[in-house]
């Protein structure tokens, strides 16, 4: 089997997109690479929220992405995932609205 990609295979893979601005703009320097990856996951899921019609009265798209789901995707522990979500909030990249006991937070993804 040939271990190299061929031209016909170039678009046959799905990728997560992480905005370049998160790495080039100085205001995002304090944000860890892991938090930037979490933002990329949230950005990827935004189309699903739009497809489901998950918008609020102001037309803002929101999503549900639990700590457990983030743990499964990124392979980090509970405390680290909570820290990553907090980093994104502090960097003004997301807003989380808590819904109450046992319900996932509503997450609004903000533009970078």
Image (tube, rainbow, N blue to C red):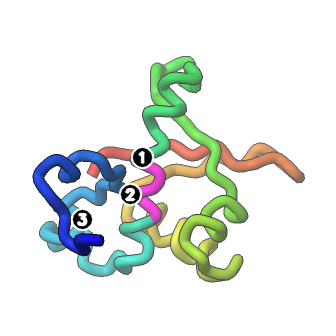
| Residue numbers of the magenta segment | 38-43
Residue density around tag 1, few if under 14, some if 14–19, many if 20 or more, within 10 Å: some
User: Which residue occupies the extreme right position in the image?
Assistant: 101
In front: 16, or 110? 16
Measured as percent of width and height from the top left, residue 76 is found at 61, 80
Give the spatial CA distance, label 2 vs label 3: 10 Å
Residue at image mark 3: 22
Measured as percent of width and height from the top left, residue 9 is found at 22, 51
> What secondary structure do most residues of the magenta stretch adopt?
helix
Q: Tell me, yes or no, if residue 27 can be seen here.
A: no
> Which element carries disc 3, helix, strand or loop?
helix
In front: 66, or 44? 44
Left or right: residue 84 compared with residue 93? right
Residue at image mark 2: 40
Q: Earlier in the sequence, mark 3 or mark 1?
A: 3
- Residue 66 belongs to magenta span: no
Please determine whether, in this image, residue 40 is positioned above or below residue 47: below
User: Which residue occupies the extreme front position in the image?
Assistant: 1
Residue at figure coordinates x 40%, y 67% from the top left: 37
Residue 26 in which image quadrant: bottom left
In front: 8, or 74? 8
Residue 35 in which image quadrant: bottom left
Please determine whether, in this image, residue 1 is positioned above or below residue 65: below
Which of labels 2 and 3 is toward the front? 2
Residue at figure coordinates x 53%, y 31% from the top left: 49
Residue at image mark 1: 44
Give the spatial CA distance, label 3 vs label 1: 15 Å
Please say if the residues under marks 1 and 2 sit with CB atoms less than 8 Å apart.
yes
């Amino acid at each position: 089997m040939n271990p190299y990609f061929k031209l016909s295979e170039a678009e046959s893979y799905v990728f997560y997109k992480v905005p370049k601005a998160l790495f080039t703009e100085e205001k995002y320097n304090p944000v860890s690479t892991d938090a930037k990856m979490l933002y990329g996951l949230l950005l990827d899921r935004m189309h699903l929220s739009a497809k489901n019609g998950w918008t609020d009265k102001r037309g803002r798209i929101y999503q549900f992405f639990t700590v457990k789901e983030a743990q499964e995707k990124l392979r980090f522990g509970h405390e680290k995932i909570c820290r990553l979500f907090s980093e994104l909030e502090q960097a003004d990249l997301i807003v989380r609205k808590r819904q109450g006991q046992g319900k996932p937070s509503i997450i609004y993804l903000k533009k970078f």
